[in-house]
Amino acid sequence: MFKVGRMAVHPAHGVVQINSVENKEICGTKKIFYILKVIDSDVTVMVPIENASMVGLRPIIESVEVPKVYTILKRKENDSTHANGNLSWNKRYREYADKLKSGNIFEVAKVLKEIHMLKDTKELSFGEKRVLDSARTLLVKEISIAKNSKEDKVALEIERLLDK
């Protein structure tokens, strides 16, 4: 169970804060919900406690896991089967979206690395740029919380790793 006031990651919304735990009746069924506030927006999300793991709600990674993310970002080779852009954008986009929605920070890091490397071989489309920005934002927010560091400092670290 998540504690009120703690931060967590919701796969579809990114970093959230647990604002409260409330009993609600919806369509005649009473359930207990986490009331989540999406960081940096006015969005509030309700997740039934019993469905939290199914939804993919998870704690922020521990600071000791950050180096694993950084290792993915600084790899010279791309472990993707479609890094050269041979797959259609629609297929790549679906794969990227699935990885981002998984809530798995390591998958998000792989998406960021892959699109960043793709940028060196071709001009990115509008959609690719959006995915790149989404992946970067998710990583910066979570890592800055995990490391108790400022977002701009983490963003610079990530850019340095990607550019190595």
Image: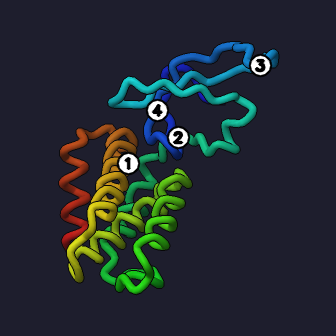
Quarter of the image where one finds residue 118 = bottom left
Does label 1 or label 3 sit earlier along the sequence?
Answer: 3
Q: Is residue 4 above or below residue 147?
A: above
Q: Which mark is residue 91?
A: none
Give the secondary structure at mark 3.
loop
Residue neighbourhood size for the residue with mark 2, other residues' Cα within 10 Å, grouped as few (<14), some (14–19), many (≥20):
many
Numbered mark located on residue 10 in the image: 2
| In the displayed structure image, the side of residue 29 where residue 44 appears, left or right | left
Q: Position of residue 136 (x, y in %)?
A: 31, 54
Q: Amino acid at mark 1?
A: Leu
The CA span between labels 3 and 4 is 26 Å
Question: Going by the image, does 19 lie left or right of 68?
Answer: right
Between 105 and 133, the one lying in front of the other is 133
* Cα gap from disc 2 to disc 3, whole angstroms: 24 Å
Task: Give the mark nearest the N terminus, 2 or 1.
Answer: 2
Find numbered disc 4 in the image and state the secondary structure of the residue it sits on. Answer: strand
The residue at the point 77 percent across, 19 percent down is 27
Q: Residue at x 45, y 55 (%)?
A: 65
Mark 1: secondary structure: helix
Q: Residues within 10 Å of mark 4 (few under 14, many from 20)?
A: many
Residue 13, horizontal then vertical, whole percent? 47, 40
Instruction: Tell me the tag on residue 138.
Output: 1
